[in-house]
Amino acid sequence: MRHGNKVNNLGRKSAHRKAMLSNMACSLIQHKRISTTVAKAKALRGYVEPLLTKAKTDSTHSRRTVFSYLQNKDIVTELFREVAPKIADREGGYTRIIRTGYRLGDNAEMCMIELVDFNEIYTNEKAKKTTRRSRRGGAKKETTEEVAVEAVVEETPAAETTEEVEAAAEETTEASEEASSEESSEESTEEKE
């Protein structure tokens, strides 16, 4: 009977299980996403999430504690330098398990386990837009071509095919080229005066 025995042994002795979870945790921290079975992913989540919480406080004691679990200096450094600042404002739930189907050989249920804050598709944060400045120090003007392409993308409904969108974009770029040539001719006449 297994009354009160909540540890999934994963068919391994304790030393083998600890080594496997340590290696999987190192791979997860290094690659931010790994593919494994659902049972191993659930066991890994219980193993790695306390380490991620511990990494939020960067002290010698917490580094040594995490190192005792991971046994890899490079991974501990990456955890405290790259991963910990990204998860600093999150209260918990640092990992996500996405089921991917069944393995061909033994029909084991497979999944991807990933760090939540490192998935660009699901995160709401947008990349910070850097503004470029010209040599004279003025802000860069947005070209009419960029504005026209953005307008076409906003105006076109989602049901249209890609060929129609490309054709509309070409028409607007031609119109914007004509407008820019007119502006340049006006600027040249102003310079002559």
Image (cartoon, helix red, strand yellow):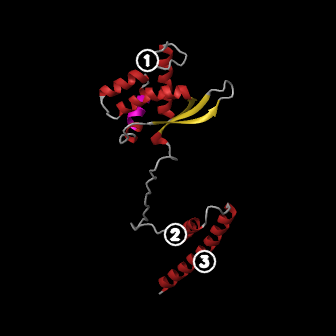
What secondary structure is marked by label 1? loop
Please name the residue shown 63% across and 73% down the image.
174
**Residue range (magenta):** 75-81
91 or 174: nearer the eye?
Answer: 91
Please name the residue shown 50% across and 20% down the image.
8
Gap in angstroms between the C-alphas marked 2 and 1: 68 Å
Please name the residue shown 52% across and 47% down the image.
121
135 or 5: nearer the eye?
Answer: 5
Q: Is residue 74 visible?
A: no
Tell me: 79 left or right of 11: left
Q: Disc 1 or 3, which lies upstream in sequence? A: 1
What secondary structure is marked by label 2? loop
Q: Can residue 157 be seen in this view?
A: yes
Say if 136 sits above or below 51 in the image.
below
Q: What residue did someone put label 3 on?
A: 178
Tell me: 150 left or right of 130: right
Residue 186 on image: x %, y %: 52, 83
Q: What residue did someone put label 2 on?
A: 143
